[in-house]
Image: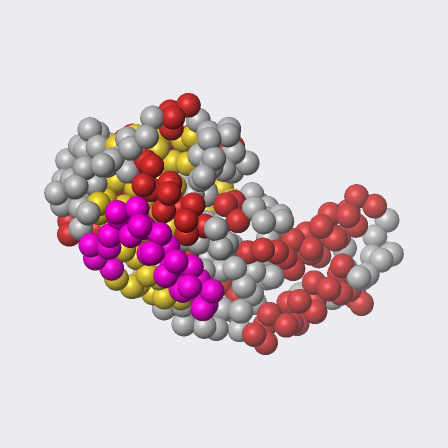
Amino acid sequence: MSISIADFPQVWQKPPAEELLASLKKLQVDPPIWNAKTSRKVIMETYQNTAKFRREVATYLSSIISSSLGWIQDDDEKEALWDEASRRLSERCGRAGMGEITRRWPLESPASTPFELIIREPPITGDSLGLKTWGSSYLLAQSLGEIAEKSLSHLLRLGQPNQSLNVLELGSGTGLLGLAAAAIWQTDVVLTDLPSIIPNLAFNIEKNRSTIELLGGGVDSGALTWGSDDDNAERFSKKNQFKIVLVADPLYDDDHPELLSSAIHEHLTVDKDARAVIMVPQRDLVTKKLVAKFLLSMASSGLVVLEEHTLVGQDDWDEDGEDSGIECWWAVFGRQ
């Protein structure tokens, strides 16, 4: 049943606080979960409805926020209404405008039953980009079964335990990709990021640990700053431990290509069959230049592209949901 703002109690009608609050609850929207089988247009229309409806909702919410609500005697009720209306407005301002959210991400592979990962994303402030679940992480997570069968078949056997294999994720953020790898590949994965990101990452690991262990995987985490030994977990003092390194959406600044390639070189085993799997969204010309710089830096470390592909994914960073998605480049690297 569709919602019409005209049917909602209006400020000029001076409705009771409980009626206004009930209406605001009806306007709550959940952040979208992307599905490769559903077009972005359908997903975003479901999430944000039409542009016309968004404008009507914004006007309605603003009327409550800007009103003194003078006919309501209880100050706590007024505050509750202003807070609720502000939350509804922020939900329609893209991911950057939201507060803390929790999403359930559905996943499956050719050898596993469907399962969900529950991922918490704290409010995003400043440059805390590691607190958001980026669309490329989910896109790469959805591809892990196929990657295991085709690109990593010499290392992984789907449907069988692979606990003897050491897997490292760099720049894990909220942990979606690394957690998915542990579950789908039935192996042990160590998730890493900056010290400031680790508390939320550790929370998500514990939230999903029972699911992953039930599927045959194992997870751990530790602080790891590229290009520095300060504040890094003790376990990373030994170099070249990991047979597979996973990375999604890691390039934002000019120094990232060299820092990332150096981290991969330091932590990937020196074996010829070791592999690094990297995905980078091609958002703009700057990102493409960073990828080119990364490829040169990897080559100088003796790490070469064995195969490369593109996939189309989505994200919810901006309010505008009218585009057709974003092209993500991904590649598998090995040692020369």
Residue 245 makes an appearance in the image: yes
Question: Which residue: 33% across, 37% down?
Answer: 266
Question: Which residue: 26% across, 47% down?
Answer: 302
Tell me: residue 69, above or below residue 161: below
The percent coordinates of residue 41 (x first, y second) are: 42, 71
Residue furthest toward the bottom? 52
In-image side of 259 versus 188 (left or right): right
State how many labels appear.
Answer: 0
Question: Which residue: 86% across, 49% down?
Answer: 73
What range is drawn magenta here? 280-308
In-image side of 322 versus 153 (left or right): right
Q: Is 287 within the magenta? A: yes
The percent coordinates of residue 155 (x first, y second) are: 16, 40
Q: Is 78 within the magenta? A: no
Residue 200 makes an appearance in the image: no
The percent coordinates of residue 79 (x first, y second) are: 77, 48
Asked whether 291 or 316 is in front, the reply is 291
Tell me: residue 169, above or below residue 83: above
Asked whether 178 or 67 is in front, the reply is 178
Tell me: residue 285, above or below residue 78: below
Residue furthest toward the front? 300
In-image side of 223 versus 300 (left or right): right
Question: Which residue: 21% across, 41% down?
Answer: 274
Asked whether 210 or 334 is in front, the reply is 334
